[in-house]
Image: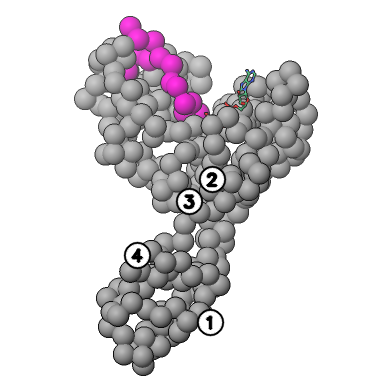
Protein backbone atom coordinates (compact mmCIF):
# COMPACT_ATOMS: atom_id res chain seq x y z
CA UNK A 1 0.00 0.00 0.00
CA UNK A 2 2.91 2.35 0.79
CA UNK A 3 6.24 2.02 -0.95
CA UNK A 4 9.23 4.33 -1.04
CA UNK A 5 12.43 3.97 -3.00
CA UNK A 6 15.58 5.74 -1.83
CA UNK A 7 13.51 8.59 -0.44
CA UNK A 8 15.82 11.44 0.54
CA UNK A 9 15.14 14.90 1.90
CA UNK A 10 17.76 17.59 2.40
CA UNK A 11 17.08 20.84 4.24
CA UNK A 12 19.99 22.90 2.92
CA UNK A 13 22.96 20.61 3.56
CA UNK A 14 21.19 18.77 6.35
CA UNK A 15 20.09 15.24 5.45
CA UNK A 16 16.77 14.83 7.28
CA UNK A 17 15.92 11.63 5.39
CA UNK A 18 18.52 9.37 3.85
CA UNK A 19 17.56 6.78 1.20
CA UNK A 20 14.47 5.53 3.00
CA UNK A 21 13.08 2.29 1.59
CA UNK A 22 9.74 1.49 3.14
CA UNK A 23 7.25 -1.20 2.25
CA UNK A 24 3.93 -1.30 4.08
CA UNK A 25 1.31 -3.83 3.18
CA UNK A 26 -2.38 -3.16 2.81
CA UNK A 27 -4.29 -3.36 6.10
CA UNK A 28 -1.09 -3.32 8.17
CA UNK A 29 -0.73 -1.20 11.31
CA UNK A 30 2.80 0.13 10.94
CA UNK A 31 4.48 1.68 13.96
CA UNK A 32 7.10 4.27 13.08
CA UNK A 33 9.52 4.85 15.94
CA UNK A 34 12.49 7.09 16.45
CA UNK A 35 13.88 9.73 18.79
CA UNK A 36 13.10 13.45 18.48
CA UNK A 37 14.34 14.83 15.20
CA UNK A 38 14.85 11.39 13.61
CA UNK A 39 12.75 12.26 10.57
CA UNK A 40 9.29 10.85 11.31
CA UNK A 41 7.22 13.96 10.55
CA UNK A 42 9.36 14.68 7.50
CA UNK A 43 8.58 11.15 6.25
CA UNK A 44 4.84 11.56 6.80
CA UNK A 45 4.82 14.95 5.06
CA UNK A 46 6.64 13.44 2.09
CA UNK A 47 4.32 10.43 1.92
CA UNK A 48 1.28 12.71 2.00
CA UNK A 49 2.72 14.82 -0.83
CA UNK A 50 2.93 17.89 1.40
CA UNK A 51 6.69 18.15 1.02
CA UNK A 52 8.87 17.64 -2.07
CA UNK A 53 11.65 15.08 -1.69
CA UNK A 54 15.17 15.89 -2.82
CA UNK A 55 15.23 12.50 -4.55
CA UNK A 56 13.50 9.13 -4.51
CA UNK A 57 10.09 7.72 -5.31
CA UNK A 58 6.84 7.22 -3.38
CA UNK A 59 3.83 5.13 -4.32
CA UNK A 60 0.65 4.88 -2.31
CA UNK A 61 -1.87 2.33 -3.49
CA UNK A 62 0.00 2.27 -6.78
CA UNK A 63 -0.28 6.05 -7.24
CA UNK A 64 2.91 8.03 -7.81
CA UNK A 65 2.72 10.68 -5.08
CA UNK A 66 5.03 13.12 -6.83
CA UNK A 67 3.05 13.04 -10.07
CA UNK A 68 -0.44 12.82 -8.58
CA UNK A 69 -0.42 14.42 -5.11
CA UNK A 70 -4.13 15.26 -5.31
CA UNK A 71 -5.11 11.68 -6.16
CA UNK A 72 -3.15 10.50 -3.15
CA UNK A 73 -4.82 13.00 -0.82
CA UNK A 74 -8.21 11.57 -1.81
CA UNK A 75 -7.34 8.19 -0.34
CA UNK A 76 -5.33 9.38 2.67
CA UNK A 77 -6.28 10.80 6.03
CA UNK A 78 -3.85 12.64 8.27
CA UNK A 79 -3.82 13.47 11.95
CA UNK A 80 -0.85 15.82 12.44
CA UNK A 81 1.06 16.25 15.68
CA UNK A 82 -0.49 19.69 16.18
CA UNK A 83 -3.97 19.92 14.80
CA UNK A 84 -5.16 23.28 13.47
CA UNK A 85 -8.81 24.36 13.52
CA UNK A 86 -10.81 27.56 13.36
CA UNK A 87 -11.26 28.49 17.02
CA UNK A 88 -14.35 30.63 16.44
CA UNK A 89 -16.21 27.81 14.68
CA UNK A 90 -17.83 24.85 16.44
CA UNK A 91 -16.56 21.30 16.05
CA UNK A 92 -19.34 20.52 13.62
CA UNK A 93 -18.82 23.72 11.59
CA UNK A 94 -15.08 22.98 11.33
CA UNK A 95 -15.68 19.45 10.02
CA UNK A 96 -18.36 20.64 7.59
CA UNK A 97 -15.95 23.28 6.32
CA UNK A 98 -13.20 20.70 5.75
CA UNK A 99 -15.65 18.28 4.10
CA UNK A 100 -16.11 20.86 1.33
CA UNK A 101 -12.50 20.19 0.24
CA UNK A 102 -13.46 16.59 -0.44
CA UNK A 103 -16.54 17.74 -2.36
CA UNK A 104 -18.84 15.67 -0.17
CA UNK A 105 -22.50 16.60 -0.86
CA UNK A 106 -23.98 18.77 1.94
CA UNK A 107 -26.58 16.25 3.15
CA UNK A 108 -24.08 13.42 3.20
CA UNK A 109 -21.48 15.62 4.90
CA UNK A 110 -23.88 16.49 7.76
CA UNK A 111 -24.60 12.79 8.31
CA UNK A 112 -20.94 11.84 8.12
CA UNK A 113 -19.84 14.60 10.51
CA UNK A 114 -22.44 13.50 13.09
CA UNK A 115 -21.28 9.88 12.79
CA UNK A 116 -17.62 10.82 13.15
CA UNK A 117 -18.19 13.09 16.15
CA UNK A 118 -19.97 10.18 17.79
CA UNK A 119 -17.18 7.79 16.82
CA UNK A 120 -14.45 9.91 18.41
CA UNK A 121 -16.56 10.56 21.51
CA UNK A 122 -17.20 14.24 20.85
CA UNK A 123 -20.92 14.37 20.06
CA UNK A 124 -21.53 16.13 23.40
CA UNK A 125 -19.31 19.01 22.19
CA UNK A 126 -20.48 19.15 18.57
CA UNK A 127 -21.82 22.69 18.91
CA UNK A 128 -19.09 24.05 21.13
CA UNK A 129 -16.49 26.45 19.71
CA UNK A 130 -13.13 24.76 19.16
CA UNK A 131 -11.39 27.69 20.89
CA UNK A 132 -12.89 26.30 24.12
CA UNK A 133 -11.59 22.76 23.48
CA UNK A 134 -8.88 21.06 25.54
CA UNK A 135 -5.83 19.58 23.74
CA UNK A 136 -7.33 16.08 23.99
CA UNK A 137 -10.65 17.26 22.53
CA UNK A 138 -8.80 18.87 19.62
CA UNK A 139 -6.93 15.61 19.11
CA UNK A 140 -10.23 13.71 18.93
CA UNK A 141 -11.59 16.27 16.48
CA UNK A 142 -8.38 15.86 14.47
CA UNK A 143 -9.07 12.15 14.22
CA UNK A 144 -12.62 12.87 12.97
CA UNK A 145 -11.15 15.22 10.39
CA UNK A 146 -8.64 12.57 9.28
CA UNK A 147 -11.53 10.18 8.65
CA UNK A 148 -13.78 12.64 6.77
CA UNK A 149 -13.00 11.23 3.32
CA UNK A 150 -13.21 7.59 4.49
CA UNK A 151 -9.52 7.11 3.62
CA UNK A 152 -7.79 3.83 2.77
CA UNK A 153 -4.56 4.95 4.44
CA UNK A 154 -4.42 6.90 7.69
CA UNK A 155 -1.30 8.71 8.89
CA UNK A 156 -1.24 9.37 12.61
CA UNK A 157 1.59 11.51 13.98
CA UNK A 158 1.84 10.86 17.74
CA UNK A 159 -1.95 10.64 17.97
CA UNK A 160 -2.25 10.04 21.70
CA UNK A 161 0.27 12.62 22.93
CA UNK A 162 -2.38 15.02 24.29
CA UNK A 163 -4.80 12.43 25.57
CA UNK A 164 -5.54 11.23 29.08
CA UNK A 165 -5.25 7.45 29.72
CA UNK A 166 -8.93 6.79 28.90
CA UNK A 167 -8.67 8.94 25.75
CA UNK A 168 -5.51 7.10 24.66
CA UNK A 169 -7.21 3.73 25.22
CA UNK A 170 -10.24 4.92 23.18
CA UNK A 171 -7.88 5.92 20.38
CA UNK A 172 -6.11 2.56 20.38
CA UNK A 173 -9.49 0.82 20.20
CA UNK A 174 -10.53 3.06 17.32
CA UNK A 175 -7.25 2.40 15.47
CA UNK A 176 -7.82 -1.36 15.78
CA UNK A 177 -11.41 -0.95 14.55
CA UNK A 178 -10.18 1.03 11.54
CA UNK A 179 -7.66 -1.70 10.73
CA UNK A 180 -10.51 -4.20 11.09
CA UNK A 181 -12.33 -2.25 8.37
CA UNK A 182 -9.39 -2.85 6.02
CA UNK A 183 -7.57 0.45 6.42
CA UNK A 184 -3.79 0.75 6.45
CA UNK A 185 -2.46 2.69 9.41
CA UNK A 186 0.87 4.52 9.57
CA UNK A 187 1.37 5.27 13.21
CA UNK A 188 4.22 7.43 14.49
CA UNK A 189 4.74 7.36 18.23
CA UNK A 190 7.19 7.61 21.11
CA UNK A 191 5.09 5.38 23.32
CA UNK A 192 6.59 1.92 22.94
CA UNK A 193 3.93 0.10 24.97
CA UNK A 194 1.30 1.55 22.67
CA UNK A 195 3.15 0.54 19.53
CA UNK A 196 3.68 -2.93 20.96
CA UNK A 197 -0.01 -3.25 21.75
CA UNK A 198 -1.42 -2.30 18.39
CA UNK A 199 1.17 -2.51 15.62
CA UNK A 200 1.85 -5.53 13.38
CA UNK A 201 5.04 -4.15 11.92
CA UNK A 202 7.50 -1.56 13.11
CA UNK A 203 10.21 0.60 11.65
CA UNK A 204 12.85 2.40 13.70
CA UNK A 205 14.40 5.50 12.19
CA UNK A 206 17.51 7.22 13.43
CA UNK A 207 19.04 10.37 11.93
CA UNK A 208 16.99 9.92 8.78
CA UNK A 209 17.95 6.27 8.22
CA UNK A 210 15.67 3.30 8.67
CA UNK A 211 17.63 1.01 10.98
CA UNK A 212 15.11 -1.73 11.66
CA UNK A 213 11.98 -2.88 9.90
CA UNK A 214 10.02 -6.02 10.50
CA UNK A 215 7.10 -7.86 12.01
CA UNK A 216 7.08 -7.19 15.71
CA UNK A 217 6.70 -10.89 16.49
CA UNK A 218 9.76 -11.78 14.41
CA UNK A 219 11.88 -8.97 15.82
CA UNK A 220 11.38 -10.13 19.39
CA UNK A 221 11.83 -13.82 18.48
CA UNK A 222 14.83 -15.53 20.03
CA UNK A 223 14.87 -13.05 22.89
CA UNK A 224 12.86 -14.94 25.46
CA UNK A 225 13.50 -14.08 29.09
CA UNK A 226 12.55 -16.31 31.98
CA UNK A 227 12.43 -14.94 35.50
CA UNK A 228 13.08 -17.27 38.44
CA UNK A 229 12.94 -16.74 42.17
CA UNK A 230 13.70 -19.66 44.43
CA UNK A 231 14.33 -20.49 48.02
CA UNK A 232 17.19 -20.81 48.75
CA UNK A 233 18.70 -18.43 46.19
CA UNK A 234 19.45 -20.17 42.93
CA UNK A 235 22.92 -21.46 42.19
CA UNK A 236 23.32 -20.11 38.63
CA UNK A 237 25.69 -22.85 37.52
CA UNK A 238 22.78 -25.31 37.58
CA UNK A 239 20.97 -23.48 34.78
CA UNK A 240 23.88 -21.90 32.93
CA UNK A 241 23.62 -24.35 30.03
CA UNK A 242 20.07 -23.18 29.23
CA UNK A 243 20.83 -19.48 28.87
CA UNK A 244 22.75 -17.27 26.50
CA UNK A 245 22.88 -14.63 29.25
CA UNK A 246 22.12 -14.54 32.96
CA UNK A 247 21.18 -11.38 34.86
CA UNK A 248 20.71 -11.02 38.59
CA UNK A 249 17.97 -8.76 39.89
CA UNK A 250 18.08 -8.87 43.70
CA UNK A 251 16.96 -12.34 44.70
CA UNK A 252 15.64 -12.94 41.18
CA UNK A 253 17.49 -14.48 38.26
CA UNK A 254 16.67 -13.65 34.65
CA UNK A 255 17.72 -16.10 31.96
CA UNK A 256 17.88 -14.96 28.34
CA UNK A 257 17.14 -17.97 26.16
CA UNK A 258 16.25 -18.85 22.59
CA UNK A 259 12.96 -20.43 23.61
CA UNK A 260 10.69 -20.99 26.57
CA UNK A 261 12.58 -23.38 28.86
CA UNK A 262 10.29 -23.24 31.90
CA UNK A 263 9.45 -26.98 31.85
CA UNK A 264 13.11 -27.98 31.89
CA UNK A 265 13.91 -25.34 34.51
CA UNK A 266 11.20 -26.46 36.92
CA UNK A 267 12.44 -30.06 36.55
CA UNK A 268 16.02 -29.01 37.45
CA UNK A 269 14.81 -26.88 40.35
CA UNK A 270 12.60 -29.67 41.77
CA UNK A 271 15.35 -32.27 41.40
CA UNK A 272 17.69 -30.02 43.35
CA UNK A 273 15.21 -29.38 46.14
CA UNK A 274 14.47 -25.70 45.44
CA UNK A 275 11.17 -24.12 46.40
CA UNK A 276 9.94 -22.15 43.36
CA UNK A 277 8.58 -18.77 44.46
CA UNK A 278 8.25 -17.39 40.95
CA UNK A 279 8.87 -18.78 37.49
CA UNK A 280 7.53 -16.80 34.59
CA UNK A 281 8.10 -15.77 31.03
CA UNK A 282 8.89 -12.08 30.74
CA UNK A 283 7.39 -10.14 27.87
CA UNK A 284 10.04 -9.81 25.18
CA UNK A 285 10.71 -6.12 25.03
CA UNK A 286 10.27 -3.71 22.19
CA UNK A 287 11.94 -1.27 24.57
CA UNK A 288 15.10 -3.37 24.55
CA UNK A 289 15.19 -3.56 20.77
CA UNK A 290 14.58 0.17 20.51
CA UNK A 291 17.20 1.17 23.07
CA UNK A 292 19.77 -1.17 21.53
CA UNK A 293 19.20 0.31 18.07
CA UNK A 294 19.43 3.86 19.36
CA UNK A 295 22.49 3.21 21.54
CA UNK A 296 24.36 1.38 18.77
CA UNK A 297 23.40 4.04 16.25
CA UNK A 298 24.74 6.79 18.47
CA UNK A 299 28.17 5.19 18.89
N1 LIG B 1 11.77 23.02 7.56
C1 LIG B 1 12.91 22.54 8.08
N2 LIG B 1 14.08 23.15 7.87
C2 LIG B 1 15.24 22.68 8.38
N3 LIG B 1 15.34 21.57 9.11
C3 LIG B 1 14.19 20.90 9.37
C4 LIG B 1 12.92 21.33 8.88
N4 LIG B 1 11.97 20.46 9.28
C5 LIG B 1 12.61 19.52 10.00
N5 LIG B 1 13.94 19.78 10.05
C6 LIG B 1 14.96 18.95 10.71
O1 LIG B 1 14.87 17.63 10.19
C7 LIG B 1 15.06 16.67 11.22
C8 LIG B 1 13.85 15.73 11.25
O2 LIG B 1 12.72 16.45 11.73
P1 LIG B 1 11.31 15.74 11.96
O3 LIG B 1 10.35 16.81 12.38
O4 LIG B 1 10.97 14.95 10.75
O5 LIG B 1 11.64 14.76 13.17
P2 LIG B 1 10.67 13.83 14.04
O6 LIG B 1 11.26 12.48 14.03
O7 LIG B 1 9.27 13.98 13.58
O8 LIG B 1 10.86 14.49 15.49
P3 LIG B 1 9.82 14.58 16.75
O9 LIG B 1 9.75 13.20 17.32
O10 LIG B 1 10.56 15.51 17.65
O11 LIG B 1 8.52 15.11 16.26
C9 LIG B 1 15.28 17.46 12.51
O12 LIG B 1 16.66 17.54 12.75
C10 LIG B 1 14.70 18.82 12.20
O13 LIG B 1 15.37 19.83 12.92
Looking at the image, which residue is at 43% across and 41% down? Answer: 191
Looking at the image, which residue is at 74% across and 37% down? Answer: 19
Residue 128 % position (x, y): 25, 15
Mark 3 falls on what kind of element? helix
Callouts 3 and 1 close, C-beta under 8 Å: no
Mark 4 falls on what kind of element? loop
Alpha carbon distance from label 4 to label 2: 37 Å
Query: Within 10 Å of the Cα at label 4, are there few (<14), some (14-19), or many (20+) other Cα atoms?
Result: few
**Which is in the foreground here, disc 3 or disc 4?**
4
Residue 170 % position (x, y): 31, 40
The residue beneath circle 3 is 287
Q: In this orientation, which residue lies closer to the viewer: 48 or 37?
A: 37
The residue beneath circle 2 is 30
The residue beneath circle 4 is 250
Residue behind label 1 places its C-beta within 8 angstroms of ligand 1:
no
**Which is in the foreground here, disc 4 or disc 2?**
4
- Tell which circle, 3 or 1, labels the residue nearer the N-terminal end: 1
Mark 2 falls on what kind of element? strand
- Tell which circle, 3 or 2, labels the residue nearer the N-terminal end: 2
- Tell which circle, 4 or 1, labels the residue nearer the N-terminal end: 1
Query: Within 10 Å of the Cα at label 1, are there few (<14), some (14-19), or many (20+) other Cα atoms?
Result: few
Ligand 1 - quadrant of the structure image: top right
Query: Within 10 Å of the Cα at label 3, are there few (<14), some (14-19), or many (20+) other Cα atoms?
Result: few
Q: In this orientation, which residue lies closer to the viewer: 49 or 135?
A: 135
Please identify the quarter of the rendering in which residue 129 is found: top left
- Tell which circle, 3 or 4, labels the residue nearer the N-terminal end: 4
Please identify the quarter of the rendering in which residue 133 is found: top left
In the drawing, does residue 166 fall left or right of residue 26? Answer: left
49 to 88, vertically: above or below: below
**Which is in the foreground here, disc 2 or disc 1?**
1
- Tell which circle, 2 or 1, labels the residue nearer the N-terminal end: 2
Amino acid sequence: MIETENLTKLYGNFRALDNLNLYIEENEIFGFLGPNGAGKTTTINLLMGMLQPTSGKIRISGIDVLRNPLEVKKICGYLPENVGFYDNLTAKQNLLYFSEFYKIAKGEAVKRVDELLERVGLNYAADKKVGEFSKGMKQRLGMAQALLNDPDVIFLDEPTSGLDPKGAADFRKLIRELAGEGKTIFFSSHILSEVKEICDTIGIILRGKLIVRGKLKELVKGKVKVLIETQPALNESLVKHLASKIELNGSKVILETEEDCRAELSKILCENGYLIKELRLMEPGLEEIYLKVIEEGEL
